[in-house]
Amino acid sequence: MDSKKIIHRVILLPGRVLPAAPAYGALLTALGDGVDVVAKDLEVDAGPMPPLGYSVDIEAEGILRAADKCGWDTFQLVGYSGGGASALAFAASHPERLETLGLLEPAWAGNWGWSTAHRALWTKYRALEGLPPEEFMAKFLKLGIRPGVTAGLPVPGGEQPPWMALCPAGIHALLHTFETCELDRHAVARFEKPVYFALGALSNPDDHVEIAERLSGVFPDFRLEVYAGRHHFDPPHRAEPERVAGALKALWDSTETGAAGCGLAGVRGVEG
């Protein structure tokens, strides 16, 4: 791509369930010209098993290497789920490298101030360890969404892609690092550049809504957009790529402080 035509330089980080290429294929098409994008897989997936001593710091180092390889002094960073958690860690440790931060339901936001309901949910996540892969994935997916939601989930008994068998090991590694790593609240609060948060209205309110609530009170320029009918495993960037592309481009073009999109009031009760 002609560098003279590049307007935005972007790194996209996926979650643990779907690799970067299929996760962001539709969004890459929707972003169109003028955007130089690296869709980067997580470091937890660098080999058949998670790296020894894996942590979000390893993910942050991987983001830094990817940007340096491209020769980017600054760039836009967007992350979903585990990639969103990694993006948060990078924003706290390397804020000078970012122009904006895009969070598509990050799976973690530090270890301070969680509600009783959120801590109870994480007890359920820990209880999944040791289950057979298929049972693990079925129960893991249900914990991320509102009770009773089935739309957008894999069909039970359907053919599974080969990478799905590796999911439990990577997910366990992420869950462990989320419990043991710290996210510096003061460092997060010092990140004054625009932050966009995409939230599915059908995601588990004790998980992703609470993360949005927490971050809205820490980031000085926090912009929330709620996507009706979407949830963590039917995320907006796959289901509504044109809308998400428009929101991200607006974020990247923006240097003004102030909320955009929907506010947080009443989000816990939204179900459609």
Image: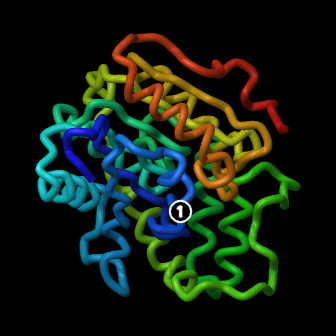
Query: Would you identify the image quadrant in which residue 90 lies?
Result: top left
Residue at 46% from the left image edge and 67% from the top image edge: 21
Q: Is residue 63 above or below residue 50?
A: above
Residue at 64% from the left image edge and 51% from the top image edge: 235
Q: Is residue 136 above or below residue 192?
A: below
Query: Would you identify the image quadrant in which residue 44 lies?
Result: bottom left
Q: Is residue 69 above or below residue 47?
A: above
Using residue 266 as the reference point, say whether residue 2 is left or right of it.
left
Q: Residue 36 in the image: x percent, y percent? A: 31, 48
- In the image shown, does 36 or 175 lie closer to the viewer? 36
Q: How many marks?
A: 1
Q: Residue 269 in the image: x percent, y percent? A: 81, 30
Residue at 27% from the left image edge and 53% from the top image edge: 1
Q: Residue 243 in the image: x percent, y percent? A: 62, 37
Using residue 27 as the reference point, say whether residue 262 is left or right of it.
right
Report the coloring of the rendering: rainbow
For this orientation, the residue located farthest to the right is 148
In which quadrant is the C terminus drawn?
Answer: top right
Q: Secondary structure at mark 1?
A: helix
Query: Would you identify the image quadrant in which residue 83 lies?
Result: bottom left
- Res 219 seen here: yes
- In the image shown, does 265 or 194 lie closer to the viewer? 194
Q: Residue 49 in the image: x percent, y percent? A: 36, 84
- Res 115 seen here: no
Using residue 201 as the reference point, say whether residue 193 is left or right of it.
left
Q: Which residue is mark 1?
A: 23
- In the image shown, does 147 or 16 lie closer to the viewer? 16
Using residue 242 as the reference point, say whether residue 68 is left or right of it.
left
Q: Is residue 181 above or below residue 184?
A: below
The kind of residue tagged 1 is Ala
Question: Badge 1, how many Cα within 10 Å: few under 14, some, many 20+?
Answer: many
